[in-house]
Amino acid sequence: MRCWRLDVSRNFSRYLSGELSPREIKRLEDHLLDCGLCRAKLARLRTGHRFAAQLPPEIPRRDVWPSIEAGIASEQSERLIKRDRAWRRAVAHPGFAVGAVAIALVLLALLVIANRRSSSGQQGTGLIADAFELRDFHRVSIADIERNTEPHVVAEGYVSEVRIDN
C-alpha cells in the first residue's frame, strides 16, 4: 500500500538536515509512528545522507560550463538548420502551392457562405432564445418566485443587447 502524505515525505531531507521547526518535527514523527512505508523511505534517505557525508569533497580541475553551453548552442543551431532546410524543401515543392491555393479557395467560399447567411433575413440570430416564443413567458416578481408554480426562467447578469425579430 502506498502512502499519499506528500506533505510529510517532502520534508524528510529537511528533517535529516535539522531544518524543521519543533512543530513540524512532531507532526512528521507522529506520522512515522503509524506509517512503515515512510519509515523505510526515511531510513533509505538517511543511509544516502550518511554516504554523501563520507565522500571527500571534489573540486573540478577546470570550469566545464563554457563547454556545456557550446554543446547546447551547437545542438540547437543544428536543429534550426535542419528545420529551415525541411521548410524550404516543403515550400519549394509544387504540391505546396497547389494545396495553399486550394485551402485559400475553401476558406473564401466558407466566408462568402457565412456572410450570405448573416445578411439574409431567413436565418435567426443563432441564439437559443430564437427557439422560444415571447407569449410563453410571463412576469414573476422576485418576491413571488418561491410560491410560483408555473414554469419560469430566472436569469442573472447584465444584458448587452436585446433584439426581437418579428
Image: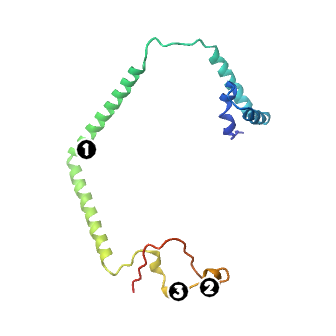
Report helix, strand or loop for mark 2: loop
Which residue corresponds to the image point at 64% horizontal and 16% vertical from the top-left?
Answer: 53
User: Which residue, as the protein is rendered here, is positioned at the far bottom?
Assistant: 135
Q: Callout 3 environment at 10 Å: few (<14), some (14 to 19), or many (20+)?
A: few
Q: Which residue is mark 2?
A: 150
Q: Which residue is mark 3?
A: 136
- Sequence-first tag of 3 and 1: 1
Select label 2 or label 1 by which is in front. Answer: 2
Report helix, strand or loop for mark 1: helix
| Distance between mark 2 and mark 1 Cα atoms | 65 Å
| Distance between mark 3 and mark 1 Cα atoms | 59 Å
Q: Callout 2 environment at 10 Å: few (<14), some (14 to 19), or many (20+)?
A: few
Describe residue 97's horizontal placement relative to residue 34 as left or right: left
Q: Which residue is mark 1?
A: 90
- Sequence-first tag of 3 and 2: 3
Marks 3 & 1, CB-CB < 8 Å contact: no
Instruction: Where is residue 98? Give x, y as percent.
Output: 21, 54
Q: Which of the 4 image quadrants contains residue 109?
A: bottom left
